Every structure is written in structure tokens, then in C-alpha cells.
Amino acid sequence: MSADLASLVSPLGVVSGLRPLLPDRGLDLLSHVVAASGDSHTGHHDGNPQLGTGRGFDAALATTVAIAEAAERYVGSYPEADTVRATAADLPGAVLDLTRLPRCSDAEYAHPGCPVVPADPAAEIRWLRGTDLTTGEPTWVPAVMACYGLHPEPAERFVFQISTGYAVHVEPRRALLGGLLEVIERDAIALTWLRRLRLPLLGPAGSSPAVRYLLDHGRRRFLDNVLFNATTDLGVPTVYVLQRAPHDAQAANLVGAATGRTLADAAEKALIEIANIRQLFPHGTAPVHGDTRFTDIMDGARYMAVAQRAEAFAFLTEDLARRPTSDDCRELPADPAEALAVVLDRLRGIGAQAVCVDRTSAELRRVGLVALTVVVPQLQPMSLAPLAQFRAHPRLAEAPAAMGVPASPEQEQNPWPQPFA
């Protein structure tokens, strides 16, 4: 950890605390560090600090990642003072097209418990200036899409606020790439679940010493990890993992997913993610009983993890013995600038616009960090709100069609809550 990054950590700092955790039993090579974000004075999270987590085979890097992620949470939840209040038509220059934002279906909007409303281009809302990553043109973005700590006004409740697309790094290109890869990862998670995609099993390209170590640990703990190639029409390496534990009635079915430069990188990240979820799983806590009352990021995972809901994962487990394997995915270049160009070209290929908003605070700038939010409205959002899955977004039909999956009506989409955490 650099001295500059360490300066963010203090009881009243951007990162209020840092704590290494004991490794999971049998995962002695894997370091785990948790950092707590400082108080951003928004009240958005009821005064509870948000956590940044670093896990990996390099202890120093795990610490750095934990601090950076906590700093990302701090900046993401900090309200932006320089917002402009206007209708889309009243803004000078390019504006993110509100008619292309993800939409819920009429049935979703009609439910009294639906937490979102359709975007209204004629409504006066708050905006932030961003940059179109393809054209370089300054572009206005709804502030609620670039700052999840901003309390939405009634006309601004058209998105599910979550940290997707937020990234912190010392190199702007790496921050941009990290934000884009997370948006693409969440798109794949939502597509897989809502369309119940029968993903191919991950082939040999998804293997590495780290992946084999993590899988061996699972076998020793009677955890059955099934790895799938979840790469979408964007061609960015993505792996989806279903972890089955028949002996654990409260955490029998967990999922994880990740994008990476290679399928092996994505598989390693997804397995570490699912290990983190299992460790954080509140053992002894009763599972959530009502899928319309979710308030915590873990509620969907807890609700779906219980053994009696294994049927919801049948589309992933049926015919596994006859399921094809796939390594169909090209690696991203090792150079971040080249990888960024490839990803942006893939997004252009499906007609998607990518816009970034600089959210770097003075504290982060002083230590050489940059904080960015990346918004790609054409991709499918991963929503943890069961009553707001954005089932009318064209991406739900267009992406599977591009992957050879026929269209299906909303009634055939997955009705179960999103199990990702």
C-alpha cells in the first residue's frame, strides 16, 4: 500500500477503518481485507459505513483494493453540489437520451410496490456534465445515474441506485475500463437470470492455478461449483458460477459472476466473489420471507439461497452432463488503453452509448486517485428490487437474439428475485 493511499485511512477520513480478516478455513493463500468508508454526511445509508472488500493472493494488493473500494463507496454516496436543475430540452449541448433508458414493463409500473417510475423527458430534474467515451463530446447525465448517494426526487426515481459502473484507480484509463467491465458484468448477470439462459459450461481456457486452488477448496468443503461461460454478444470474457451446498439449508444455492481480461481471470474473480458472499452470509439469521420487502443488498441472495428454492436454478442445472463446454471468447489486450478501445468498439457495434462522469473528490485527487462513474443505458441493469427488473428494456430481447436465443414474452421471463449480492 502506498503512503499516499494510507493517508486516506483515519477515524474521520475517507476510509474510517481498515481490518484484515482471518482467511477462510483451507484458503490460507487468499488474503481478505475489509475497509469502512467515512461519513459522507448524506444520511443515504442510515449512518452505517459502507464496506470495501479486497480479496486476492497478494496481501498488499488486497489491502489496496479494499481502501480503493471504500473510497469509491464514499465518493459514490457523496452528493454532488454542482448539479444543474433543468428539463432535458433546456440543457445546452448533448444530453443522454431519456427515451433509451431501461424501462420497466407496464405490469411492473402498475404494481403498488414498484419503487421506480418511467423517465419523463419533460420533467425538471438534476443533471451532471459527463463525457461521451466515443465522441469525446460533453454530455449531460441525470445526476441520480452518476451519484447513488443522491436522494431522488419523485421525477428522478427512474433508476435503481446501485454502485454499478463506479470505479477508482490511479490511472484514468484503468478506472474507465473497470467501470465498463462492471456494467458489462451486471448486464450478463441480469440477462442470464431474467431470460434463464442455458449457458454453456466453461471450457479449459477458464482454468488457471488460482482457479484450480479455489475449486479444490470447494470440493474439500463439499461445495459444488459449476462454472459457465456467460460471455454475451459483446464478447467480453464473463464467467457465471453456481455454488451448490446441499448440506447447508440456508445457503444451498449461491451465485457469483465476473468479467476479466481472460476467461481464467473472470473465473478466478467469480470464485473469490462467491467465497466472499458465503463468508458474509449471516449464518443463524432467518431467511427473508417476502420478496417485496427487500431492504438490504443481501436480501435477494438470502431469499434465494435456501434449499427449497433450488428449483429456481433448474435452468442452470438441467442436463449438465450433456451441456456443451465453451471457450468462445477472445482475450482483451493486456494494455488498458487497447482493451478500452476494444470494449468501446464492441459497445458501438450494438449501438450503445457509454458516458463517464468524473466524481473525483478533493481528498482522492490529493493522493493521485481518480473516481469515475460509467453509464451505458442500452445495457440491462442488474436490479436487486424484485418489483423493478426493467423487463421492457429492449436489451432483454436483443442480446439473447444475437446469441441465438429466440424471443419470449414477459410472462416467460424469470419471476424469481435476483439472487446476486
Image (spheres, rainbow, N blue to C red):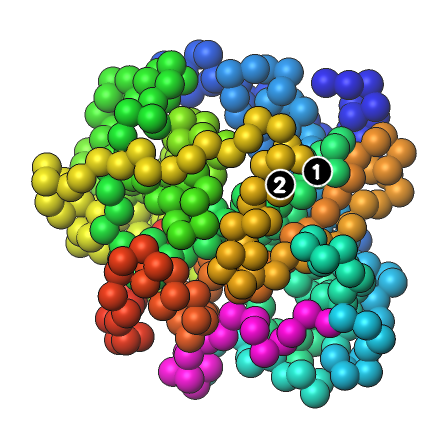
Contact (CB < 8 A) between labels 2 and 1? yes
Q: Quadrant where the N terminus lies?
A: top right
Q: Position of residue 50 (x, y in %)?
A: 64, 44
Q: Position of residue 86 (x, y in %)?
A: 81, 80
Judge left or right: residue 29 versus residue 321.
right
Which residue is located at x 62 percent, y 42 percent? Answer: 341
**Mark 1 burial class by Cα count in 10 Å: few <14, some 14-19, many 20+:** some
What segment is highlighted magenta in the picture?
Answer: 95-110
Q: Position of residue 151 (x, y in %)?
A: 70, 67
Amino acid type indicated by mark 2: Leu
* Residue 364 in view, yes or no: yes
Which residue is located at x 56 percent, y 15 percent? Answer: 58
- In the image, residue 270 sits, relative to residue 111, either above or below, namely above
Which residue is located at x 62 percent, y 41 percent? Answer: 340
Disc 1 element: helix
Judge left or right: residue 372 versus residue 421.
right
The quadrant in which residue 116 appears is bottom right
- In the image, residue 164 sits, relative to residue 110, either above or below, namely above
- Residue at numbered disc 2: 340
Judge left or right: residue 12 versus residue 348.
right
- Residue at numbered disc 1: 173
Disc 2 element: helix
| Label 2, label 1: how far apart the Cα atoms are | 7 Å
Amino acid type indicated by mark 1: Arg
Q: Where is residue 414 in the image (x, y as percent from the top left)?
A: 28, 64
Given residues 70 and 402, the one toward you in this image is 402
Residue 235 belongs to magenta span: no
Given residues 408 and 334, the one toward you in this image is 334
Given residues 178 and 33, the one toward you in this image is 178
Camera-nearest label, 2 or 1: 2
* Residue 11 in view, yes or no: no
Which of pointers 2 and 1 lies earlier in the amino acid sequence? 1
